[in-house]
Structure formats: structure tokens, C-alpha cells
Image: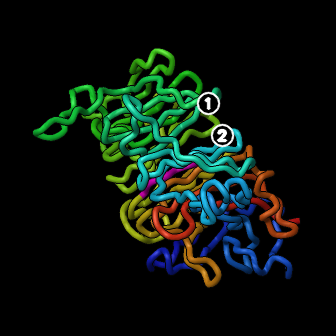
């Protein structure tokens, strides 16, 4: 693989496709010219920008005459404020909204929007990331509370993991058991919680909510290659391997299912391809391609399973303003049919890639990974 030019990442056009273009792909046709594709022509397109959501108005639901009569002529549209984490489950997109301190729930099929703002003991202060179990149970990380908050599918507060940070006249006081959770993943009977306080990932028994072990196993004595400094986001691949984006070390760490260090993705700090300025969200597709959000260079870089750099996307183009302080990336195979109509003629979607933007008018950008005829 030839090295990339040593110039800032956002000013470089996408280079070699490597393994990303394996398989069937064709160049854009005349009917596709208005669509935004990555990489740029003459390379075969593999990612298309499809649409975005910044609030209720983007769901396309028409206000009924009754609603207009009751509320008035101007029916307020609910906006997404400052999104970070998100999850897709059962046609519903859940967005952690730092702006409103809520979970914004967008039903993509029914085209409805609501804010989930529990009160009392289950009140959310700073929602950063969310993971949803098969039965609809929601796990939300709140680093200000120092807990992972747990809610049922019907919005009931079920409890928390971690000791709650208590506020007093002298300020906030956290117990020795308090966490500073930045991300959470539920997989089978395990919960993975990225903890900025201990600089590790805690692995819990989901049912008992008991700590099983940490990753790395011994955070304080781990060698430099396997250590975590500021673990901010998590992902799992189909083989159960864990990926941790480490904001403090400018890299992504890969561990096996038992927590043993395997590999590092990224070439360290910088704004050149393969380097990271502010690595945040991380996701892995079924082929093992690793997607990493860089909030500094404001693109998503893609790596093959061995850590070799593939094209990036999200840069500013002539017909696309690009990502705007991106934070989270998720990959979804279950809801492709909801977005196929946005795809250019002849471009068939294989899966979705969703990215949150904390600024701009595209708070959740939806891309489609696919191929042409």
C-alpha cells in the first residue's frame, strides 16, 4: 500500500480502495450525478449520503387539522439539540441529546418524535451513549451521575450500575465505587462499560449487575501497548472482539473476548490519513471493517480487519458540507428497507452507516454502504 500524501486529512481526496471495493461495483451513471458518493469519481462508489435528521420536521409527518386547531397554527417542531450516542432498535432511533438532557426517540416508520426525560431517581443528567438489549431494555451512560442508568422498554426506571454522585453545598462528591462511564454495550449476558475514571472497560454480568473483570485485566500495571488512557467508545465484532477508541492515546485498541490485547488501529496523533486527532465513535461491520470517527479532522476513517487504512468519508465536498463535529458512528443491517428509496438508481444498499454531528443542520447523517449493478 502506497503512503498517503503528508497533508491535512480534510484536504485530501480519497485514495486507494484496497479491500473496500472487492466485489461488484460500477461508476455512477448520469442519473446518479446529483447523489453524493464516497469515494469520489472516477473510483467506484461504495458509500452514498442518503438523508439526515435534525428534529421532528425531518420525519415528514403532516400535522393534522385537529392538532393545528388544539395547538394553534404554528405547531412546534421538536429539535435534536447536541447529539452524541445513538442506537437503532425496532424502527426507532434513540439519540442521546446533551442539549436537552434527554433521549430523543424518532420512530422512523410511524414518523413520530418524542423526548424521553424521566424524573425522580431515574432522571438523566448528561446522556452520552446508549445500548439497547433484545427485549428493549435501555442502558444509558451518565458520567455526571457516575452511573449507567437502566430503563425498561416501556420507560420504567429499573436501577443503575455504579454509585450515584451526590451533590452537596460544597460541590459533588463521588463514592469510591462511582464510575465515569462514557459508553456501554450489551452483548448476551454481559455489559461492557467504558470507564474514564479507572481508564478501563468494566465487564459486568448483565442479570446480577456484578463486575466480572476489567479490560485490560490489570489497568495499573498493563504495558504501554495494551493500556487504555481515555476510553470513550466501544464496539464489538461478529467474533466477540472488543474495540475501544482511546481519546487520550489517539488510537483504537482491539481485545479478544477474554480481554487480551490483540492489535492497535491508527498511527498515533496527527491529522494525516491513518492518524487521529480526536478519535471518538467506533463501529465494525460484518466483514470486519472498522469505522472510526475523528472529531478533530471531522471525517470517518475506515480500516480493514488487519488495521490497514481504507478510504475515509464525510469530508466537505462541492455538493456536501461534510460532517460537523461528529461524535458517534453505528452500523445497521436491519433497517435498510427504510432508506432504500433514498439510494440513487442502480445503487443497492447493503447496510447503513449513521453518524451524529454535534453542530450544523444534519444532526444525524445517514449513509448507505452498497454497490452498483
Q: Is residue 282 magenta?
A: yes
Q: Quick check: 260 left or right of 177? A: right
Asked whether disc 1 touches disc 2, contact meaning CB atoms under 8 Å apart, the reply is yes
Left or right, 158 with reference to 28: left
What range of the chain is rendered magenta?
279-284
Residue farthest along the left direction in this orientation? 170
Q: Nearer the viewer, residue 119 or 73?
A: 73
* 22 in relation to 32, above or below: above
User: Relative to the observer, which residue lies in front, 273 or 101?
Assistant: 101
Give the camera-side residue of 356 and 244.
356
Residue 110, above or below 303 = above
Q: How is the image coloured?
A: rainbow
Name the image quarter holding the C terminus. bottom right
Q: Residue at x 46, y 46 (%)?
A: 102
Q: Determine the main secondary structure of the stretch shown in magenta.
A: strand
Q: Which residue is mark 2?
A: 89
Horizontal side of residue 324 vs 37, given as left or right: left
Where the N terminus falls, by quadrant? bottom right
Q: CA distance from mark 1 to mark 2?
A: 8 Å
Which is nearer the eye, 7 or 306? Answer: 7
Q: Residues within 10 Å of mark 1 (few under 14, many from 20)?
A: some
Q: Residue at x 51, y 24 (%)?
A: 190
Residue 173 placed where, x, y %?
A: 18, 34
Query: Does residue 61 appear in the picture of this structure?
Result: no
> Residue at the location (60% across, 56% down)?
71
As helix, strand or loop, the secondary structure at mark 1 comes to loop
Could you say whether the residue bearing mark 2 is in a helix, strand or loop?
strand
- Residue 136's mark? 1
Amino acid at each position: 500500500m502506497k503512503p498517503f500524501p503528508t497533508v491535512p486529512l480534510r484536504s485530501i481526496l480519497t485514495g486507494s480502495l484496497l479491500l473496500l471495493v472487492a466485489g461488484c461495483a460500477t461508476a455512477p451513471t448520469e442519473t446518479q450525478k446529483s447523489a453524493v458518493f464516497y469515494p469520489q469519481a472516477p473510483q467506484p462508489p461504495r458509500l452514498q449520503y442518503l438523508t439526515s435528521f435534525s428534529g421532528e420536521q425531518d420525519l415528514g409527518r403532516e400535522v393534522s387539522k385537529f392538532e393545528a386547531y388544539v395547538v394553534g397554527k404554528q405547531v412546534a417542531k421538536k429539535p435534536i439539540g447536541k447529539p452524541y450516542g445513538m442506537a437503532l432498535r425496532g424502527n426507532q432511533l434513540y439519540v442521546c441529546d446533551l442539549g436537552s438532557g434527554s433521549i430523543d426517540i424518532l420512530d422512523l416508520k410511524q414518523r413520530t418524535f418524542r423526548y424521553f426525560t424521566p424524573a425522580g431517581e431515574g432522571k438523566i443528567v448528561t446522556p452520552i451513549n446508549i445500548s439497547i438489549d433484545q427485549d428493549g431494555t435501555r442502558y444509558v451512560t451518565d458520567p455526571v451521575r457516575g452511573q449507567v442508568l437502566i430503563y425498561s422498554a416501556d420507560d420504567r426506571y429499573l436501577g443503575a450500575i455504579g454509585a450515584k454522585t451526590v451533590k452537596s453545598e460544597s460541590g459533588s462528591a463521588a463514592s469510591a465505587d462511582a464510575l465515569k462511564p462514557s459508553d456501554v454495550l450489551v452483548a448476551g449476558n454481559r455489559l461492557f462499560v467504558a470507564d474514564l475514571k479507572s481508564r478501563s472497560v468494566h465487564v459486568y454480568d448483565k442479570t446480577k449487575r456484578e463486575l466480572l473483570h476489567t479490560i485490560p485485566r490489570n489497568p495499573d500495571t498493563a504495558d504501554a501497548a495494551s493500556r487504555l488512557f481515555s476510553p470513550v467508545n466501544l464496539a464489538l465484532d461478529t467474533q466477540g472482539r472488543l474495540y475501544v477508541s482511546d481519546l487520550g492515546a489517539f488510537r483504537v485498541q482491539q481485545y479478544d473476548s477474554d480481554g487480551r490485547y490483540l492489535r492497535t488501529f491508527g498511527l498515533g496523533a496527527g491529522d494525516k490519513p491513518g492518524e487521529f486527532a480526536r478519535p471518538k465513535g467506533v463501529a465494525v461491520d460484518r466483514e470486519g471493517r472498522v469505522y472510526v470517527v475523528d472529531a478533530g479532522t471531522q471525517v470517518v476513517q475506515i480500516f480493514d480487519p488487519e488495521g490497514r487504512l481504507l478510504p475515509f468519508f464525510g469530508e466537505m465536498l462541492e455538493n456536501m458540507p461534510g460532517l460537523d463535529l461528529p461524535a458517534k458512528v453505528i452500523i445497521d443491517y436491519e433497517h435498510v428497507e427504510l432508506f432504500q428509496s433514498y439510494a440513487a438508481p442502480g445503487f443497492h444498499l447493503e447496510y447503513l452507516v449513521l453518524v451524529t454531528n454535534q453542530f450544523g443542520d444534519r444532526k444525524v447523517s445517514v449513509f448507505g454502504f452498497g454497490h452498483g449493478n
